[in-house]
């Protein structure tokens, strides 16, 4: 039925990561100019719409594609081609139904949803975003099918296509409407229209790519008897619902984060609606930067689930632990330096990306940078446990973390002396609690506990040295160029050049220290495409 050509999970993750880099570059081309077009106030409408969209999207696609990729991986490892096809068919119709519910709800009640989150001007954007839920559900089905075969290439290309279309259409619409003199509310809706069109483009690409590469139909050569449709549906529900609930709670928490923060600023901290909307817009812009490292975790999440599931079905418990530990270590190698860099260079970063934004963004991004690593590792452990057959355990961690988030955010944001700065602290408390609970559960339910020194130790030392070097370069050059008033594209050169030099220094220092301290080894490099050749060039042993 399908080509038996897959990648090991890190090979697949490496391919996906290359795509993610392109997606993030395109995303920056999209969101940074968009934030400057819409301003702090208009960006609130855009951000609130995405929070509602992500809630419905999570309910529709969070757990079931993961469950489908796991069932396909298990069946494919046993050469059950007919079973693979039937899992795909059941998954497709299930996802269509879920997506239709989300789309209808957003189209039928946009004003009510906008009022619920305290941003009535977001109603038009919510309505325009609605079809994306159904389109992404179909796309997720095909992505789950390819990922179940450990094939990350279609997913990678589809995301690049999706983001490229979003940049062209979304930014074009928002910029065109802005030049024509429309309000920021209309401009935000124009940007959202780009998301809907890009979702359609990604869906069409995935359908063509998967049908060209795989025989997505019953195989006449296969002899296996597939399980009944009801049994497969029940397996999807049994595996998918705990994951969906867990991830949906995270979406609810993110939605509540926006609702609580905006309402506490308006009612408890004493800000006017306009001032509160401006502060929240700054927070959302900082969140855009904060979310960049999590995108680099997505390839590992997509790859680690079928890899662990396949090892588990073979009862290879030590392989399960090694795969989980490798995924967490590579996640640390990629995300920890971004988190540290975000914290130590938060001020110049916000001034370069959003020069017209309010000054609160610097401290907000610094707080979020500290939070960032805990968030990425929480996402990783939330995927490892279900892949190991412990679907319900992340739910406990998410509930405890979510409770911490809601309480801390409500109390701190409502304090006029802390106000919006309390929102990142609530997020930090959420992910610290969540990660701690997940690590305890992994130690209890896997063959052995994770080796935290092997996961974090050497990378952590490398990042500490990197952070000191990057901050020192920024401070030195910014001080020397203090009198320079020239600018490029609205960015003062006395900020832009020191920031670029600090980032470049940080990259080089981290790279050198990671190799010197053996944070990445030859065995790690062998898992990547052409990794052994790269390791030889870099003298990685």
Image (cartoon, helix red, strand yellow):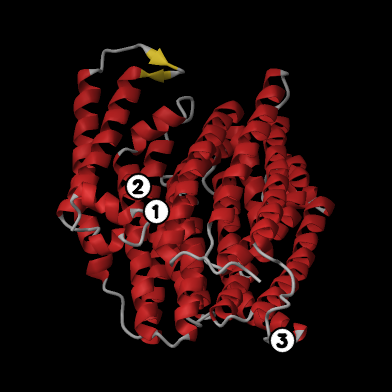
Residue that label 1 marks: 372
Total numbered badges shown on the rendered structure: 3
Q: Quadrant of the C terminus?
A: bottom left
Q: Position of residue 513 (x, y in %)?
A: 18, 49
Relative to 136, say whether 366 is above or below: above
230 sits left or right of 26 in the view: right
Could you say whether the residue bearing mark 1 is in a helix, strand or loop? helix
Residue that label 2 marks: 338
Q: Position of residue 437 (x, y in %)?
A: 40, 75
337 sits left or right of 395 in the view: left
Q: Are marks 2 and 1 in contact (CB under 8 Å)?
A: yes
> Disc 2 or 1, which lies upstream in sequence?
2
Residue that label 3 marks: 231
**Residue drawn 25% across and 24% down?**
478
Q: Nearer the viewer, mark 2 or mark 3?
A: 3
Q: Are marks 2 and 3 in contact (CB under 8 Å)?
A: no
Q: Which mark is residue 104?
A: none
Q: Work out whether residue 297 or residue 184 is closer to the camera in this orientation and state it.
A: 297
């Amino acid at each position: 039925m399908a080509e038996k050509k897959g990648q090991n999970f890190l090979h697949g993750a490496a391919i996906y990561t290359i795509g993610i880099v392109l997606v993030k570059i395109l995303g920056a081309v999209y969101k940074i100019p968009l934030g400057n077009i819409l301003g702090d106030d208009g960006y609130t409408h855009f951000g609130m719409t995405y929070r509602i969209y992500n809630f419905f999207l999570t309910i529709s696609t969070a757990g079931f594609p993961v469950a489908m990729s796991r069932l396909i991986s298990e069946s494919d490892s046993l050469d059950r081609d007919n079973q693979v096809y039937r899992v795909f068919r059941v998954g497709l119709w299930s996802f269509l139904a879920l997506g239709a519910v989300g789309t209808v709800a957003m189209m039928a009640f946009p004003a009510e949803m906008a009022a619920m989150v305290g941003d009535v001007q977001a109603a038009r954007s919510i309505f325009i975003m609605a079809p994306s839920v159904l389109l992404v559900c179909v796309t997720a089905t095909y992505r789950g099918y390819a990922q179940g075969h450990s094939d990350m290439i279609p997913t990678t290309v589809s995301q690049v296509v999706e983001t490229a279309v979003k940049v062209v259409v979304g930014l074009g619409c928002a910029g065109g409407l802005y030049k024509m003199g429309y309000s920021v509310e209309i401009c935000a809706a124009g940007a959202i229209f780009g998301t809907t069109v890009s979702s359609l483009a990604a869906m069409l690409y995935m359908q063509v790519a998967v049908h060209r590469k795989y025989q997505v139909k019953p195989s006449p050569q296969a002899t296996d008897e597939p399980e009944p449709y009801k049994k497969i549906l029940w397996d999807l529900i049994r595996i998918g619902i705990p994951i969906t609930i867990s991830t949906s709670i995270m979406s609810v928490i993110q939605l509540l984060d926006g609702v609580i923060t905006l309402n506490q600023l308006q009612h408890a901290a004493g800000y006017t609606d306009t001032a509160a909307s401006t502060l929240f817009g700054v927070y959302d812009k900082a969140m855009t930067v904060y979310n960049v490292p999590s995108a680099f975790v997505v390839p590992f999440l997509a790859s680690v689930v079928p890899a662990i599931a396949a090892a588990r079905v073979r009862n290879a418990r030590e392989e399960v632990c090694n795969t989980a530990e490798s995924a967490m270590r590579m996640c640390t190698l990629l995300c920890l330096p971004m988190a540290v860099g975000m914290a130590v260079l938060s001020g110049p970063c916000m001034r370069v990306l959003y020069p017209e934004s309010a000054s609160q963004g610097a401290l907000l991004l610094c707080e979020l940078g500290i939070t960032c690593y805990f968030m990425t590792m929480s996402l990783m452990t939330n995927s490892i446990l279900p892949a190991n057959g412990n679907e319900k355990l992340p739910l406990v961690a998410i509930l405890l973390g979510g409770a911490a988030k809601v309480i801390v955010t409500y109390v701190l944001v409502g304090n006029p002396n802390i106000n919006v700065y309390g929102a990142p602290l609530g997020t930090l408390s959420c992910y610290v609690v969540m990660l701690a609970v997940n690590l305890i559960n992994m130690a209890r339910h896997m063959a052995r506990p994770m080796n935290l020194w092997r996961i974090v130790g050497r990378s952590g030392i490398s990042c500490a040295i990197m952070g000191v070097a990057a901050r020192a370069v920024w401070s030195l050059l910014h001080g020397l160029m203090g009198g320079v008033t020239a600018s490029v594209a609205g960015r003062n050169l006395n900020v832009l050049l020191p920031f670029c030099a600090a980032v470049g220094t940080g990259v080089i220092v981290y790279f050198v220290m990671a190799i010197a301290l053996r944070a990445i080894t030859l065995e790690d490099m062998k898992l990547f495409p052409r990794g052994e050749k790269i390791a030889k060039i870099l003298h990685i042993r």
